[in-house]
């Protein structure tokens, strides 16, 4: 799990050309696990090796919705749009594709989730239920919480840039001396 989250983070760091903004995408992973646990609880399914495999798969799958949303917001901001306006526009344009990809994946997993197929004595139903629960929870929470955390982490990025520029620039050091 740690290795897959690390690889997702590094890949998004290269994609977004930032190591702070991918954190807003990684926020969707714990919320998908929230959906997994509720689904396993409501369906009275025990957590076994197949559900754990489903959780590892979810790490790569649930970040797709957040990546699509944040990537469009970044492109709109590069075109000169305000951050809040870019997030609203990205949410409007990516709402339907996010719903479509999530529902098609979830509906494709229904036969696995309700079936009783086994391989080497391990049932596939926990894997399907895990994936469906995680996808549904992450879809809902991605549309709400990822823009919120994007805003928070973007503010953090700007704050760190200001602190670093004032600490390491010549003018910033002179202003600090004058204030003292």
Image: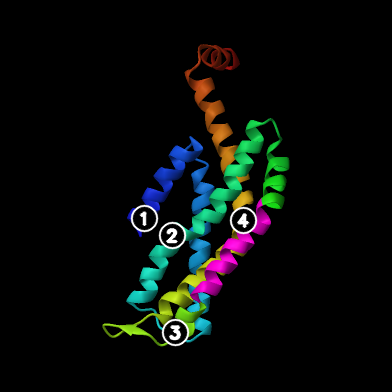
Label 4–label 1 contact, CB within 8 A? no
User: Which secondary structure lies at badge 3?
Assistant: loop
Name the residue carrying label 3: 45
Q: Is residue 142 magenta?
A: no
Name the residue carrying label 1: 4
Mark 4 or mark 3: which comes first in sequence? 3
Label 4–label 3 contact, CB within 8 A? no
Mark 1 or mark 2: which comes first in sequence? 1
The main secondary structure of the magenta stretch is helix
CA gap between label 1 and label 3 equals 25 Å
CA gap between label 4 and label 3 equals 28 Å
Q: Position of residue 23 (x, y in %)?
A: 50, 47
Q: Is residue 106 magenta?
A: yes
Disc number placed over residue 59 in the picture, else none: 2
Mark 1 or mark 3: which comes first in sequence? 1
Disc number placed over residue 145 in the picture, else none: 4
Image vertical order of residue 176 relative to residue 106, above or below:
above
């Amino acid at each position: 799990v740690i290795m897959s989250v690390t690889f997702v983070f590094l890949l998004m760091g290269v994609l977004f050309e930032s190591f702070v903004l991918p954190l807003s995408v990684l926020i969707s992973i714990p919320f998908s696990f929230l959906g997994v646990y509720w689904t396993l609880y409501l369906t009275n399914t025990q957590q076994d090796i197949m559900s754990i495999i489903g959780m590892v798969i979810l790490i790569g799958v649930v970040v797709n919705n957040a990546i699509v949303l944040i990537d469009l917001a970044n492109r709109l901001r590069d075109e000169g749009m305000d951050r809040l306006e870019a997030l609203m526009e990205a949410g409007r344009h990516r709402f339907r594709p996010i719903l479509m990809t999530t529902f098609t994946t979830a509906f494709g997993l229904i036969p696995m989730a309700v079936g009783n197929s086994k391989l080497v004595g391990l049932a596939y139903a926990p894997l399907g239920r895990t994936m469906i629960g995680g996808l549904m929870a992450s879809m809902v929470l991605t549309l709400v919480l990822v823009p919120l955390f994007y805003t928070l982490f973007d503010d953090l990025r700007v704050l760190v840039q200001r602190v670093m520029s004032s600490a390491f620039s010549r003018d910033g050091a002179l202003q600090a001396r004058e204030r003292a």
